[in-house]
Image: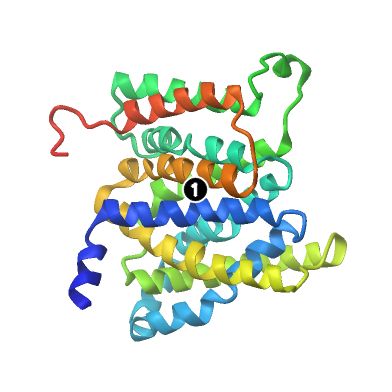
Amino acid sequence: MTRMKRWIYDQGYVLMVIAALVWASNIIVGRGIHDLVPPIGLNFWRWVPTVPILLALAWPHLREDWPVVRSQWRWMFLLAALAISGFNTFIYLGLERTTAVNALLINSSRPAIIVLLSFLLFQVSVRNTILIGLICGLLGTVVIILRGDLFRISEFIFNSGDLWVFAATVTWALYTVLLPKRPSIHPASFMAFAVIFGLLQLLPLYIWETLTIEAFPFTGDTVVAILFLALFSSIIAHLSYNRVVELLGANRAGIISYLILSFGVLMAIILLGEVFERYHSVGLVLLVTASWLVARPTSRSPG
């Protein structure tokens, strides 16, 4: 069993499929219960049950890693804000107002955004084909946000849910690009500290939402959803994705967005009864083209 775990731990693409399947489920669950729970409360409570589990996993390393975290707390704070408190809050806000299919398609623009941010922040070289891919990715996202109606630009008619999902997509792309800068500590320690930092960031927002908008309702359905999101979407997917970035690099890790798209659209149609519209097809073609142009290796690349 140990040998099998070690093999999986070193297989970047296997871990990518695992994370993609779980994160596609995250969007389906978020959309499925959007009318039952408030978005910040859902994000807050999905992380709370992970704390004892992560502390147990990281316990042998926490004392040794704490001085490193303390000396690099700004990086921990930023990465936690992007991955823990920011990304899913934006996603759940978006899923209140847009469909899971739309969210999945907009989210699949992530690879192009990762490459763009890598260039802007760290001057990572960009080929001409990547520039074309970035344009295709932008066009595909615009088509979906405008629902295939270009007149929405002049009329300023936008679905705020789509814009929240796009903000989440940019947030996660930035997390991916900055992840190699994380403190050099054990993966379980990094995850545990990130969740604690993220919950501290979410706490005042959760209190505000509870007092002014809506309290989180603890029912059978919401508790099951929280436990699923905590174990799978929060722990398994994040640990897998962090390892994917470590093994494959930020740009190739961005390909996970298209696996999430494939799994998620099927689940949205089957489980939520959503419809795949014509404009979705146009956006999908542009986004898949962008992914291929951005992620394909050069002739000198080893893989």
Q: Please give the name of the residue rendered at 30% of the width and 35% of the height, measured from the top-left corner.
A: 124
| Residue found at the very far right of the displayed protein | 212
Q: Is residue 185 above or below residue 63?
A: above
> Of residues 82 and 224, which is closer to you in this image?
224
x, y (%) of residue 139? 52, 21
Residue identifier under label 1: 172
Q: Please give the name of the residue rendered at 61% of the width and 42% of the height, measured from the top-left corner.
A: 165
Identity, as a three-letter code, of the amino acid under mark 1: Trp
Q: Is residue 233 left or right of residue 294?
A: right
**How many numbered marks are there?**
1
**Is residue 32 among what the camera can see?**
yes
> Of residues 82 and 210, which is closer to you in this image?
210
Binning the other alpha carbons within 10 Å of mark 1 as few (below 14), some (14 to 19) or many (20 upward) gives many
Q: Is residue 105 left or right of residue 295?
A: right
**Quadrant in the picture for the N terminus:** bottom left
Q: Under tag 1, what secondary structure?
A: helix
**Quadrant in the picture for the C terminus:** top left
Q: Is residue 109 above or below residue 182?
A: above
Q: Please give the name of the residue rendered at 31% of the width and 66% of the height, measured from the top-left corner.
A: 184
x, y (%) of residue 83? 51, 56
x, y (%) of residue 291? 38, 31
